[in-house]
Structure formats: C-alpha cells, structure tokens
Image: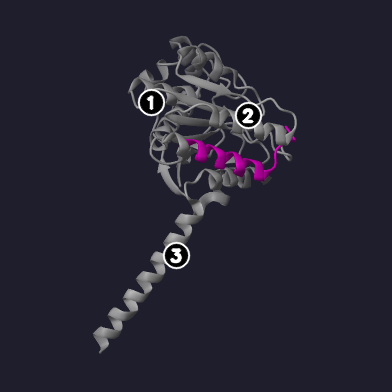
Amino acid sequence: MKVVFHEDFRPPYTSDPAAESGRMEAVERVIRDRVMWVQAIPATEEEIAAVHTRAQMERVRREGVYDIAALAAGGAIRTAAIGLTEPCFGLIRPPGHHASAASSWGFCYFNNMAVAMEKLYREKKIRTALILDFDLHFGDGTVNILEGRGYVTILNPTAADRNAYLKEVRHFLFAEKVDIIGVSAGFDHHVEDWGGLLTTGDYREMGQMVREAAGKNGGGCFGLLEGGYNHRVLGANVMAFLEGMERNHFLSCSLSFVRFLIASFVCYFFHSSVRA
Ligand SMILES: [Zn+2]
C-alpha cells in the first residue's frame, strides 16, 4: 500500500505532542518494509486558500510553521488523489482536524482533510464524500469547514463502549453510497493512549470496514494521520489500520508468492534447457 510521507515531517517543529521527536520514526520503524513510499509535495497557497482565510494563513506564517503545515496539506492532497483508485495513507504532521477556516488550535494549523477533499471536489473528481474521524477528539475544524458545503457527511463516533463504537462506525460507512471515504485517523483513543478505549485490532477492523464500504461503493478511500501520542503503540496501530484498509491484502500476498514460484520454475527450466 502507498504511504505519503516526507523526511521534513521527522524533525519537531513546535513543542506540542504531535510535533514530538521520534513520533514519525515510531511509525516508520513498524511499516517501513510493508509499504511503498510516495513523496509529499507542499500545497499551493491557492489550494490552502480554498478552505482557509488569508488571515489564518498569515497567522500560521507568523508562527513559523507555514512550510511544514503546507507540506502536510499537500501530503493530504496527494494521499486523497491516490485514494481515488487505491487505498492510501498520509503519514503527515502537523495534524489538521482542529483547524477551522479562520482559526486553529489543538496542534493543528491547516485542515489537511478539508484541503484534500475540497481539491477533489473542485476538480470534479468526486461529487460526494464521507469523513470518518476516529481520533479521540471531536474534529471541530473539519465540521466547521466542510459540513455546510453539501457534499460531505462527517462522523465523529461518540459511543463510550468499544463494540457500540465499532457498530456506530459500520452503520455510518454503509449507510450512504459515496465517491470517496476519507478517514481522519487519530490513534489517541487507543487503550494505551489518552483515550483508553480502542484496541489495535479495532483499528484493523475499522480499516477493513472502510475498504469494504469503498469497494461496495465502487469508490475510493484514504486515511490521514491526526493524533496518537504513545510512541510505543502508534506504529502498530497505524500498521493495523493499513492492513485492514489494504485491498485484498491476503490475496495480493498469496498472489505474489505464486508469481514468485512460477518465476522460479521458469528460471529453473530455462537454465536446465540451456545446459542441455
Ligand atoms: Zn486527538
């Protein structure tokens, strides 16, 4: 599966937990050999201005984080574009779901999800979308920016019980047929993170639900990193979500093994016949 990333996401850019040293590396270590890396490129001013005010953009510039925030937003655009045809994940920071048009808080500056969705919508690549935000915190920025635009339905699950939570997610994902499903994937609701509710397996299950729902829709899907602050478990949680979301994960693994076997036999017979 393709994962959009950039080495500039590694160094801390502020002193908040989302920008903490080692956070990207904690994910990279676990997923490194299992994914195909795609380089993020910065969002243009015009792409950011499609959902943010000029004053907000100036404020972010004054705080000295414009470049990294624009790179995260650009990473989200790339992730969503790939997501149209195959599941894709954006390993990006700063996160974005607390960024509204003219303000932001909670370690966010530009709303990566809103920038990416709006770009797809304006380019007429999608007509409808769902956003599942399973971060521990309510994605107020995403709701403020996108809810009134008419093409997106957003869920921030509220169930306090694990099974009810998963049920709520499933019901939402399968209720409506849409062109794309975007996931604001924050992993801070994990049992060993701030929220203390969801298991690593639950992220795999939600990834599967997203893939199945997108498959049923004949549409796309993608995820963007939001929160997730326990570096000991963040990598495993991202990996579980990717495994769930990857189309025909087991099928593609077994297919590549079969291809490998066939190639080995072909080589063997070719060399035998050359020697003969
Ligand atoms: Zn959060």
Query: Residue 82: which quarter of the image?
Result: top left
Look at 46% across and 25% down and name the residue there: 129
CA gap between label 1 and label 2 equals 37 Å
Along the viewing direction, whichever of 65 and 205 lies nearer the viewer: 205
Q: Earlier in the sequence, mark 1 or mark 2?
A: 2
- In the rendered structure, which amino acid carries the disc numbered 2? Ser
Residue labelled with disc 3 = 257
Color theme of the render: one colour
Bounds of the magenta segment: 195-214
Q: Position of residue 163 (x, y in %)?
A: 71, 36
CA gap between label 1 and label 3 equals 35 Å
Residue labelled with disc 1 = 126
Residue labelled with disc 2 = 15
Mark 2, Cα crowd under 10 Å, few <14 / some 14-19 / many 20+, is: few
Look at 73% across and 39% down and name the residue there: 191
Quarter holding the C terminus is bottom left
Q: Is residue 115 above or below residue 12?
A: above
Mark on residue 101? none
